[in-house]
Amino acid sequence: MRTFSLHLAQQEGRIFVNWKKTVRPVIRDTEALHYVHSGEGVIPRVDCSLGSCPFGSPQRVLDKWRTGFASDPCGYMGDYFLVEEAIVDFWGGAVKKEDILLGAGSIGILYNLATLFGDSRFHVLGLAPQFPDVPLYFSYMESPVDKVTLSGPSYRFRVEELISRITDTTAMVYLDNPHNPTGQAIQLSDVEILADHCLDRGIMLIVDEAYGGFMEEEESSINLKHPNLVSVRSFSKSWGMASLRAGYAVARDPELRGLYNKVCPPFPLSPDLLELIPLAMEEKEYLPGLRTRVAYLKKRTMDTILSSPGFSLAETALQVPIMLVTYEDPKVDLFQLLLQVGIKSEPGEGFESLGRNSIRLRIPSPDKLEEFNTCWKELLKRI
């Protein structure tokens, strides 16, 4: 017979810990709506949900994937310096090799940062709406998370508004750029103003550039040299390598890098990535061409939406493949209606401050654009 007290259990004369009571209450009690799981099990006619690249991977990456790798799958690691050299070369001297941190996608790096810096005594400041997982990770580490709510229907970011919310308890500011879910690209001059303000107050600024490959390199926060800045990048989005889970960050402060490496699990990249990443980054014309193609598809998609009565779009950049779509009636469940006509998106309810009448939409792949338009016409008959 087993009887449990608050923290201990007794069985056959032995006292042992009840493991369920060791879980942090904030993790146990937080109801997390992970937007990426929405509509699982549904095979849509047009998938506009997750932020994978609508044009696939660079050709050299595909060729290598099909022909096989030189690395031994039995080994733990290979030559990480090949990846680091590729990153340094890509940025043309804006990055030094020692500035680079590696991780399992940008989300793996951001989770490591939350593990490292989460503290109940200090606050994290972000936006609403915003990529929800990172503030959630800091909450799990018991950091209070404050948010500046962007105003619809434009949801335009204003750096002055974010700065005005920084207090003496703010230890960290989290900013995604391009912004998720709107797809707006925040100007580097605004990021620099924010970084300067944070530096003067000893505050760390994390700029999540998971979609950064869709904006020009000169607009990246990687060009800034602030020691309180961490710029996080992914190979999942623009580089079309989402299933491989690879990312990197640039951090100028050596103490910060040393602390990060204490919490980062060993062997952050698999050996096949050590071959694929340099191949991708050597294609100098890939990203500029990708942005042009995305802008064309996005313009056509936006034209379809904006010509529909009752619909609005948040401020967004043409070359970024995601956008925030809202219908005027707050009672309408736009995600479910779209799913019924064959379009899978991400529900607004997965983002703080948004309702069910909003969705995040990634542009359809080029071969699905006409089918998207067909499905959208069906939606307008039902709404």
Image: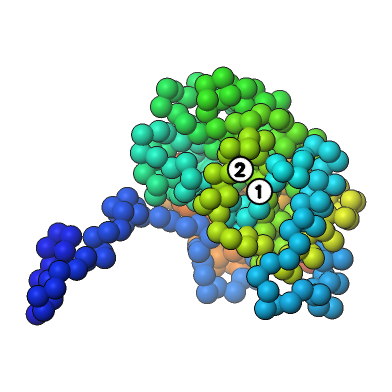
Residue 153 at least partly seen: no
Q: How many marks?
A: 2
Residue, disc 2: 257
- SS for dot 1: strand
- Tell me: 1 left or right of 16: left
Relative vertical location of residue 339 with respect to residue 189 in this rendering, above or below? below
Q: Quadrant of residue 218?
A: top right
Residue 86 at least partly seen: yes
Residue 105, image x and y in percent?
63, 57
Near mark 1 (Cα within 10 A), the count class, few <14, some 14-19 or many ≥20, is: many
Residue 81, image x and y in percent?
77, 55
Near mark 2 (Cα within 10 A), the count class, few <14, some 14-19 or many ≥20, is: some
- Give the mark, 2 or 1, whose residue is nearer the N terminus: 1
Q: What numbered label is drawn on residue 101?
A: 1
Q: CA distance from mark 2 to mark 1?
A: 7 Å
- Which residue does the image show at 52% across and 28% down from the upper left? 203
- Tell me: 382 left or right of 65: left
What type is the residue that disc 2 sits on?
Answer: Arg
Relative vertical location of residue 190 with respect to residue 253 in this rendering, above or below? above
- Which residue does the image show at 71% across and 51% down from the upper left? 321
Q: How is the image coloured?
A: rainbow
Residue 91, image x and y in percent?
82, 42
- SS for dot 2: helix
What type is the residue that disc 1 sits on?
Answer: Leu
CB under 8 Å between discs 2 and 1: yes
Quadrant where the N terminus lies?
bottom left
